[in-house]
């Protein structure tokens, strides 16, 4: 059983508090992603779990046991570093078998486990090379191999794919997913890339400035973002987020531009309240070029000028001007459009979000 | 007929050739030639008597020479090993310091700022059997009740000389190894800790292999240094007592300038240069191997 619990976990460097007492429970065999913009404290949190960084307050439990004062070697974890951190003077074989050698395992066992891991990762042909003779993607595999050879209770990944080019990254992402299905350990995966977090994990932890903003399944954080920050962070292209004020049954953006108050928020907002309306590009489309997810009556249409288009082949991102700024929308089965064209846009308000402008919290309760 | 003119490349390179010939090539050839003559500074005519390998034969038969040779090798071994150990320790301590590291680095280099002659005088004074601070300290602490004859007993004198040599040059190792430690990526060390290494295992399997090339660079520099050691010994014991601390170069200079036997001294010098070359080549090989090992890009 390798659950991981963070209890009021805090990190300070001198007087500067970096991680502000976060709580998190990771279930056994769960794949959990810590995601957030760079500098938000993801690596620091992960390194505290690994024991590479001392904790300033709170507690960390692995498998129900408090490990606050244990050195990394006593925590039964593996870590894959962003820079791979391979041992430059050892061959791939030695790199992968190193932890077992340190643990004084018999040589035949080391050979067998290295062979197994290298077969999983397709490293069989490279075992006698040194890290300097490998490409970035291969080094990355070796780093993963070194982690799985140990058969730890918990895997920690710190942005393992961010030094790879886009194509390799997608490929390795799939491999990590397969790997998790095979090794079946608890995984804590740090990334700043929300796509990675969405595709890989069972649950996502969204961090911001040393706080946890929301914990939830990919579907939850996508469909029910708890805060304006999460709404803007998850999803690509990002959600349209526009400040507005509530006025008798309307969301008023000023200068006479309004949208009807979405039905799901009736009774949850008060007149005069300052809010932020959020609408994903998927829920805004040139009429006839998208699908609404709720009732027909929740779709609101306005004619708007096109400012830019970004054709992607199967779809086109259309930027239309509304409320004094560009709203991005996704146009399925695209037809050619040019800047300045006026087109009828559908706002699927059943999918709209409202956040309190001051606190940033969702107004959906 | 026009006078023949030198081509431009030859003309341009000529000054360099002339200077090199004058300051390097000619003296080298002259000294090599003189090692085959019984040349004495006091009798210039002997410069023109060619005696083939007689000088070399008498060197190989000379007990004094081989003692000096052996002592030089011993000093080299003792000094280099201890300097490396101390330098490594010092570098690791300084690297750990999170505050005042600059200051410590500067302090560490202090011994290098003194001329070896001055170091010799200072250590001669410190190891003086009557007024020296070493005996004073030993006696005050009750560790010894007689004046230990540091510079008079052969073995002790060798110890005192080694101490001076090590004091003045440990920083060469410390600085180069510190450079290695500072250049070392920190992630492999963290990976080793996660992989289950104790601090000692981390050092043994990860840090040391990385720092090794830097230690070999220091070894190369210092082996040349110690192989030509002269000044500290000259000041502290002048090869004495009774030749017990005679090193190669004190012997050579005594032969050349004391006894004025330039031909013989030159022959000795050529033999000792071979020693230096052997050590240098050895450490260079080690360095190259260590660099390949860590996949260094320099
Ligand atoms: N040793 C340190 N001393 C002071 N501040 C640090 C130190 N290490 C990290 N920080 C700060 O902690 C914050 C979080 O860093 P980090 O956890 O690496 O962020 P992330 O991995 O989310 O990009 C950053 O603002 C960083 O500047
Ligand atoms: Mg980071």
Image (tube, coloured by chain):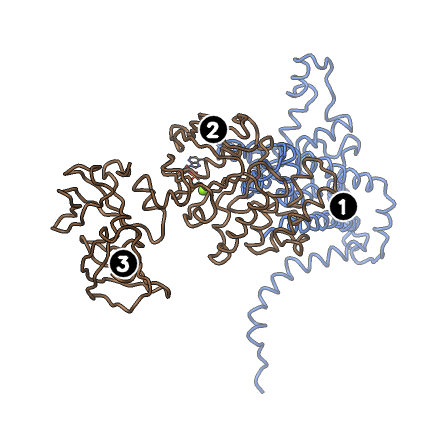
> In the rendering, at what x and y percent does residue B81 appear?
70, 36
- A92 sits to left or right of B268: left
- Quadrant location of the N terminus of chain B in the rendered image: bottom right
**In percent of the image, x 76 and y 45: which residue is there?**
B260
Assess whether mark 2 and mark 3 are in contact (beta carbons under 8 angstroms).
no
Q: CA distance from mark 1 to mark 2?
A: 73 Å
Local SS, label 2: loop
User: Could you say which chain is coloured blue in the image?
Assistant: B
Q: CA distance from mark 3 to mark 2?
A: 48 Å
**Circle 3 residues within 10 Å: few <14, some 14–19, many ≥20:** many
Tags 1 and 2 on a common chain: no
Give the image quarter of residue A111. top right
According to the picture, the residue beneath numbered tag 2 turns out to be A55
Rendered shade, chain A:
brown
Local SS, label 1: loop
Local SS, label 3: strand
> In the rendering, at what x and y percent does residue B9 appear?
57, 73
According to the picture, the residue beneath numbered tag 1 turns out to be B260
Tell me, for residue A285, which label it has, or none. 3
């Amino acid at each position: 059983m390798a659950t991981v619990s963070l209890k009021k976990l805090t990190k300070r460097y001198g007087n500067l508090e970096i991680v502000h007492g976060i709580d998190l429970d990771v279930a056994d065999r769960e794949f959990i992603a810590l995601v957030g913009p760079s500098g938000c404290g993801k690596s620091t949190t992960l390194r505290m779990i690994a024991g590479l960084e001392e904790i300033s307050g709170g507690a960390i439990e692995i498998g129900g046991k408090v490990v606050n004062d244990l050195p990394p070697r006593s925590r039964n974890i593996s870590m894959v570093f962003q820079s791979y951190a391979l041992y430059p003077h050892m061959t791939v074989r030695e790199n992968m078998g190193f932890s077992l050698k340190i643990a004084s395992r018999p040589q035949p066992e080391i050979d067998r486990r290295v062979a197994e891991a290298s077969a999983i990762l397709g490293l069989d042909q490279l075992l006698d090379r040194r890290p300097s003779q490998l490409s970035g993607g291969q080094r990355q595999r070796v780093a993963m191999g070194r982690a799985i050879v140990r058969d730890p209770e918990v895997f920690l990944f710190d942005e393992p794919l961010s030094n790879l080019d886009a194509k390799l990254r997608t490929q390795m992402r799939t491999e990590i997913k397969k790997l998790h299905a095979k090794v079946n350990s608890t995984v804590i995966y740090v990334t700043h890339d929300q796509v990675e977090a969405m595709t890989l994990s069972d649950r996502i932890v969204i961090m911001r400035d040393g706080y946890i903003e929301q914990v939830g399944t990919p579907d939850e954080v996508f469909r029910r973002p708890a805060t304006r920050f999460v709404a803007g962070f998850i999803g690509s292209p990002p959600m349209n987020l526009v400040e507005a004020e509530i006025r008798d049954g309307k969301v008023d953006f000023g200068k006479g531009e309004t949208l009807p108050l979405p039905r799901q928020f009736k009774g949850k907002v008060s007149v005069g309240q300052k809010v932020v309306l959020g609408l994903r590009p998927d829920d805004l489309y040139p009429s006839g070029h998208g699908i609404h997810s709720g009732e027909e009556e929740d779709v609101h249409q306005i004619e708007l000028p096109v400012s830019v288009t970004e054709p992607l082949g199967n779809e086109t991102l259309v930027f239309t001007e509304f409320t004094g700024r560009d709203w991005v929308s996704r146009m399925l089965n695209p037809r050619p459009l040019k800047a300045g064209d006026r087109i009828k846009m559908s706002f699927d308000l059943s999918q709209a979000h409202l956040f309190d402008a001051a606190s940033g919290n969702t107004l959906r309760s | 007929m026009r006078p023949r003119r030198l081509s431009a490349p030859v003309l341009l390179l000529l000054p360099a050739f002339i200077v090199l010939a004058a300051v390097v090539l000619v003296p080298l050839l002259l000294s090599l030639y003189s090692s085959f003559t019984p040349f004495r500074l006091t009798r210039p005519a002997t410069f023109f008597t060619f005696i083939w390998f007689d000088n070399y034969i008498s060197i190989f038969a000379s007990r004094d020479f081989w003692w000096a040779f052996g002592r030089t090798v011993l000093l080299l071994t003792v000094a280099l090993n201890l300097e490396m150990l101390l330098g490594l320790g010092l570098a690791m301590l300084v690297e750990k310091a999170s505050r005042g590291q600059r200051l410590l680095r500067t302090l560490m280099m202090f011994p290098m700022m003194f001329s070896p002659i001055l170091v010799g005088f200072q250590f001669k004074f410190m190891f003086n059997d009557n007024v020296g601070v070493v005996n004073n300290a030993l006696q005050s602490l009750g560790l010894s009740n007689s004046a230990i004859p540091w510079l008079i007993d052969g073995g002790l004198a060798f110890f005192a000389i080694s101490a001076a040599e090590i004091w003045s040059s440990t920083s060469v190792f410390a600085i180069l190894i510190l450079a290695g430690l500072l250049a070392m990526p920190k992630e492999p060390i963290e990976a080793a800790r996660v992989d289950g290494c104790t601090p000692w295992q981390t050092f043994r399997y990860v840090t040391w292999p990385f720092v090794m090339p830097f230690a070999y660079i220091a070894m190369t520099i210092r082996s040349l240094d110690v192989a030509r050691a002269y000044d500290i010994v000259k000041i502290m014991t002048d090869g004495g007592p009774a030749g017990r601390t005679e090193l190669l170069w004190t012997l050579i200079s005594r032969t050349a300038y004391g006894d004025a036997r330039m031909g013989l001294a030159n022959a000795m010098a050529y033999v000792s240069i071979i020693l230096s070359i052997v050590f240098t080549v050895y450490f260079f090989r080690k360095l190259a191997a260590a660099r390949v090992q860590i996949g260094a890009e320099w």
